[in-house]
Amino acid sequence: MSRREEKSALRRRMSALRDGIDASERRQASEAIARRVMALSAWGRARSRLLFRSVGSEVLTDRLIADTLKARVELILPRVEGPEEPMAFHVVRDLQEDLAPGFAGIQEPIAERCPERSIYDLDFVLVPGLAFDRRGGRLGYGGGYFDYVLNLRTDLVESGSVVAVAYSTQIVETVPLEGWDVEVPLIATEHELIDMRKRSV
């Protein structure tokens, strides 16, 4: 089996596993995950935070988005124009007025309403995914959108200002990686904060 086939098989398995988590359990776990993220020094010192709106069975990010808006920190949400285009980054101030269904039906910033920011304006990046391992390996959805960000912002990766969020059931022994995949420094689950910076070499 090729590396690409391994990743596709793992995506299917982990997507089904995550979809099987009970809705109330998902809410409770997401609340615990949000508390772990908000306790990080990188969260507190960031002046702009790239977050994402949860879809399907992803970890719920509502609490993190609300905290960012309340703190008057710039809430940056991604916008994708198409499968071959990198993400654009926009400041969102009002979730009711500033968002509309975009690529793949996901709620995204309305470009005409929301100021655009450079990838180099980001102070903190929250990362979704389907599977992670304890070395920081991450399996995304196959679009490469967040890998693009992490490849350009290695400073954020190295400073611990990139955090992946996942349910504990999404942690696997090994995620198959390819050359462009970037390991994440921190993974917040409902049970623990996995910090790759503390692992022995």
Image (cartoon, grey):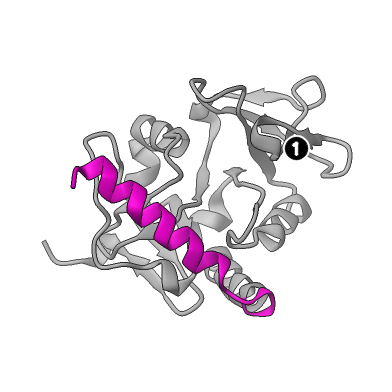
Instruction: Residue lying at the far left in this picture: please name it.
Output: 201
Q: Confirm whether the magenta stretch covers residue 162.
A: no
The quadrant of the rendering that contains the C terminus is bottom left
The span shown in magenta is: 1-25
Q: Nearer the viewer, residue 35 or 108?
A: 108
Tell me: 13 left or right of 69: left
Question: Is residue 21 positioned above or below 128 on the image?
Answer: below
- Name the residue tied to disc 1: 92
Q: Nearer the viewer, residue 154 or 42?
A: 154
x and y percentages locating residue 56 in the rendered image: 64, 56
Tell me: 132 left or right of 106: left
Q: Is residue 40 visible?
A: no
The residue drawn where x is 49% and y is 28% is 120
* Residue 178, image quadrant: top left
x and y percentages locating residue 93 in the rendered image: 80, 40
Query: Three-letter amino acid code at disc 1?
Result: Val
The residue drawn where x is 31% and y is 48% is 7
